[in-house]
């Protein structure tokens, strides 16, 4: 969730792609079941050289101190 | 109306009987008649024959109604079948007098329905058991004859509805070894069959089309004034598929609500329970005539009824909470009164003698998640049932940390997890809420059940108990690896079903470690997994037909996970393979576990083509041998579906949690 927020904030995930999703409200990621499906469909998508899964793994390993590095 | 004719009741009865025989004969032989006439090139048009036969049955019913009315009129005129004739000792049979009958009005079977309703009223109120018995048998016969007759059904249930729903309580025997006499069973069966048939009937056309059973009758059914009696009609009624799914769903909700509200759902106690044997016998009676269980069982047989209940977005969770519970047994009894005062000086003891009733509950849960995977409304309800059951299980686990669900219910939970494995894999580690969404969130794709990741963490420790259950479940996951590989290649999005499987494996492994079973070594588990894996690979699980492009059909196939066997069937009988199994443990470990499903998945996805002369690929199935091992080592670096074979295998090893 924090990763998705970080990637969206820095324009790595195109706005058009997240617009209209029930989990994206006023610029904030508010996760729900459709967020799960979105994450699942982008597991291997590469953002700034790393797949979404790699981003997630890093964030999980560094939690709770992880900060958006972008 | 008003078309009065004079009839002799006995002659009318004889005529009706002959008409009925004629109809039966025609109905029985009509297929043969049609077949023979066609064979002989007959020019007689026989297409209308079935219609004529159906019309004949209507005539039989009409005549039957008229006969009944004729005898009734004769009785009203003072006639009695048995009487005394001067000069002759004892009783003699009297012929009824000729009566005048309104031919048209009595010819409608609705009248027979009304009369059957009156017969039921009379039988239930009868002081003389012998009279009641005769009436009940005639009533069963009439109900049976009019099962498919809308007029009769509508008239009978409108008139007798409330009474029929209390029939079981009026009919049960106050003493003796059985709860119901043979006549009572026959009438309960007939009432159940009639209700089931009526539940499926609709009247009116277009906008006016509505159920034949009136709103009042349906309200009485679910109104809970006597849930036990209603349950008995369902118990003695026909198999679940013969009922309307919505009526069964309403009945299920009503029963569960009555049970939750503490209403009387058990058969009546007959007299004081004097001895412990009496008390124990009463528990058995409760189990045998369990009304809630009877309705759950029929709804499970129906399938869709169970999904209507648990798949309802507003109320499904409430009922899932009631079902996923450890209270599915008879209440038991206080043994105190049966103990000597020396052993037990007084006070209430914990109940004993409870009988397990979890089987119908488990069957219901299973049916609720058993719709065919896909895009249908039924598939959607099934997915919502999954979401609700997972949440209810998580809540049970949180509220009762020490309690374990009954084995039968846990088996249904495991069945559900296996049936929705890709959905669970997608949900694992993602605590973002639950819902039912089309795959990829694209309209027109099959429905998937998204469970909240935190619920799944609580679900598995309740569903799986003991090393054997874990081994079975993991072996089942192993068999889905090839489908996960193929789907990952085929799905044009960046989904990675194989690594999602790895996430679910991790969750299951953690759960198992927490439960800390000492009775099984890791080695034993591996041996069991090997055995099950081999059986599943050769027995028809795993490989799918992924030839077509990634669309709803292929997705549904992937989600379902059933397909052709991965391994060539010959392998079971192949002597060489057996020798390999016995001797080369290391080969088996290497080949059987990871490479097989990966290679099969890549072949299914159409990205790996085995060489023409491969000895290890026969009839589209794998038949591993020594040359397969050498082929593998030569192609470790080759790229298939965007990844090197070695990487696929590594990821699969991760997914299957195998250290090599």
Image (cartoon, rainbow, N blue to C red):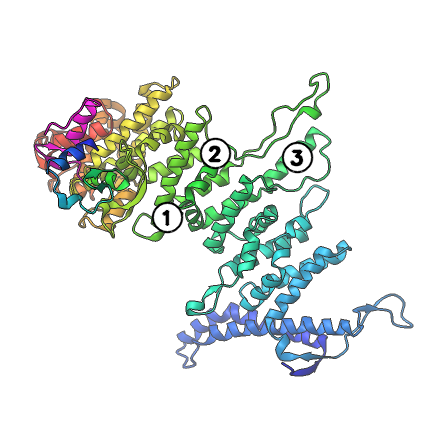
Q: Earlier in the sequence, mark 3 or mark 1?
A: 3
Q: Please, is residue B261 above or below residue B276 in the view? A: below
Chain where mark 2 sits: B
> Callout 1: 10 Å neighbours few (<14), some, many (20+)?
many
Quadrant, the N terminus of chain B: bottom right
The residue sitting at 68% across, 76% down in the picture is: B12
Distance between the alpha carbons at the discs numbered 2 and 1 = 21 Å
Q: Earlier in the sequence, mark 3 or mark 2?
A: 3
Residue B614 left/right relative to B621: left
Residue at numbered disc 3: B281
Q: Position of residue B540 (x, y in %)?
A: 30, 41
The residue sitting at 43% across, 31% down in the picture is: B396
Q: Earlier in the sequence, mark 2 or mark 1?
A: 2
Would residue B17 be visible to someone looking at this image? no
Residue at numbered disc 2: B325
Say whether mark 1 and mark 3 are on the same chain: yes
> Callout 2: 10 Å neighbours few (<14), some, many (20+)?
some
Distance between the alpha carbons at the discs numbered 3 and 2 = 25 Å
> B368 or B387: nearer the eye?
B387
**The quadrant where residue A36 appears:** top left
The residue sitting at 65% across, 76% down in the picture is: B15
**The quadrant where residue B216 appears:** bottom right
Magenta residues, start to end: A42-70
> Callout 3: 10 Å neighbours few (<14), some, many (20+)?
some
Residue at disc 3, secondary structure: helix
Count of marks overlaid on the render:
3
């Amino acid at each position: 969730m924090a990763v998705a927020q970080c990637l969206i904030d820095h324009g790595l995930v195109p706005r058009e792609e997240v617009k209209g999703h029930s989990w994206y409200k006023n610029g904030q990621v508010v996760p729900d079941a459709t967020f799960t499906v979105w994450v699942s469909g982008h597991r291997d998508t590469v953002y700034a050289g790393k797949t979404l899964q790699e981003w997630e793994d890093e964030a999980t390993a560094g939690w709770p101190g992880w900060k958006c590095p972008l | 109306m008003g078309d009065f004719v004079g009839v002799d009741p006995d002659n009318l009865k004889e005529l009706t009987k002959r008409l009925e025989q004629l109809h039966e004969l025609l109905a029985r032989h009509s297929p043969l008649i049609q077949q023979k006439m066609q064979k002989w090139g007959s020019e007689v048009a026989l297409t209308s024959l079935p219609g004529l036969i159906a019309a004949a049955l209507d005539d039989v019913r009409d005549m039957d109604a008229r006969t009944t009315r004729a005898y009734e009129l004769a009785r009203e005129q003072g006639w009695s079948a048995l009487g005394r004739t001067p000069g002759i000792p004892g009783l003699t049979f009297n012929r009824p007098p000729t009566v005048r009958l309104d031919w048209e009005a009595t010819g409608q079977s609705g009248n027979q329905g009304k009369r059957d309703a009156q017969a039921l009223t009379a039988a239930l109120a009868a002081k003389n058991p012998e009279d009641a018995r005769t009436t009940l048998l005639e009533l069963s016969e009439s109900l049976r004859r009019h099962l498919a007759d809308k007029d009769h059904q509508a008239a009978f249930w409108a008139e007798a509805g409330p009474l029929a729903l209390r029939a079981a309580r009026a009919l049960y025997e106050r003493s003796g070894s059985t709860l119901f006499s043979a006549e009572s069973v026959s009438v309960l069966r007939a009432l159940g069959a009639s209700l089931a048939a009526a539940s499926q009937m609709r009247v009116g056309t277009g906008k006016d089309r509505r159920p034949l059973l009136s709103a009042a009758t349906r309200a009485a059914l679910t109104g809970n004034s006597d849930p036990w009696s209603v349950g008995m009609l369902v118990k003695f009624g026909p198999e679940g598929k013969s009922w309307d799914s919505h009526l069964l769903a309403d009945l299920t909700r009503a029963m569960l609500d009555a049970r939750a509200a503490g209403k009387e759902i058990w058969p009546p106690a007959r007299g004081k329970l004097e001895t412990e044997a009496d008390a124990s016998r009463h528990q058995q009676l409760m189990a045998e005539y369990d009304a809630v269980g009877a309705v759950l069982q029929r709804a499970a047989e129906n399938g869709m009824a169970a999904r209507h209940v648990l798949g309802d977005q507003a109320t499904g969770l409430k009922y899932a909470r009631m079902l996923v519970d450890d209270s599915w047994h008879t209440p038991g009894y206080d043994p105190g009164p049966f103990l000597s005062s020396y052993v037990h000086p007084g006070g209430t003891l914990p109940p004993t003698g409870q009988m397990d009733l979890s089987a119908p509950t488990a069957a219901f849960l299973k049916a609720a998640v058993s719709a065919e995977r896909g895009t249908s409304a039924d598939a959607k309800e099934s997915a919502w049932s999954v979401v609700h059951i997972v949440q209810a299980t998580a809540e049970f686990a949180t509220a009762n940390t020490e309690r374990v669900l009954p084995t039968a219910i846990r088996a249904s939970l495991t069945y559900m997890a296996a049936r929705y494995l890709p959905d669970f894999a997608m949900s694992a580690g993602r605590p973002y809420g639950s819902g039912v969404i089309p795959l990829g969130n694209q309209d027109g794709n099959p429905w998937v059940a998204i469970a909240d990741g935190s619920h799944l963490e609580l679900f598995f420790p309740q569903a799986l108990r003991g090393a054997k259950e874990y081994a079975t479940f993991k072996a089942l996951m192993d068999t889905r690896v090839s489908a996960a590989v193929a789907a990952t290649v085929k799905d044009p999005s960046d989904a990675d079903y194989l690594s999602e499987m790895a996430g679910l494996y991790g969750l299951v492994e953690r759960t198992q470690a927490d439960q800390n079973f000492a009775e099984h070594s890791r080695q034993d588990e591996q041996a069991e997994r090997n055995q099950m894996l081999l059986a599943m690979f050769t027995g028809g699980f795993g490989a799918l037909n992924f030839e077509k492009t990634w669309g709803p059909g292929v997705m549904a196939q992937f989600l379902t996970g059933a397909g052709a066997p991965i391994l060539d069937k010959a392998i079971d009988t192949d002597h060489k393979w057996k020798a390999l199994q016995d001797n080369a443990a290391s080969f088996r470990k290497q080949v059987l576990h990871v490479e097989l499903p990966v290679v099969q998945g890549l072949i299914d996805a159409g990205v790996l083509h085995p060489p023409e002369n491969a000895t290890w690929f026969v009839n589209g199935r794998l038949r591993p041998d020594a040359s397969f091992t050498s082929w593998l080592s030569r192609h470790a670096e080759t790229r298939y579906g965007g990844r090197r074979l070695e990487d696929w295998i590594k990821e699969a090893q991760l997914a299957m949690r195998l250290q090599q």
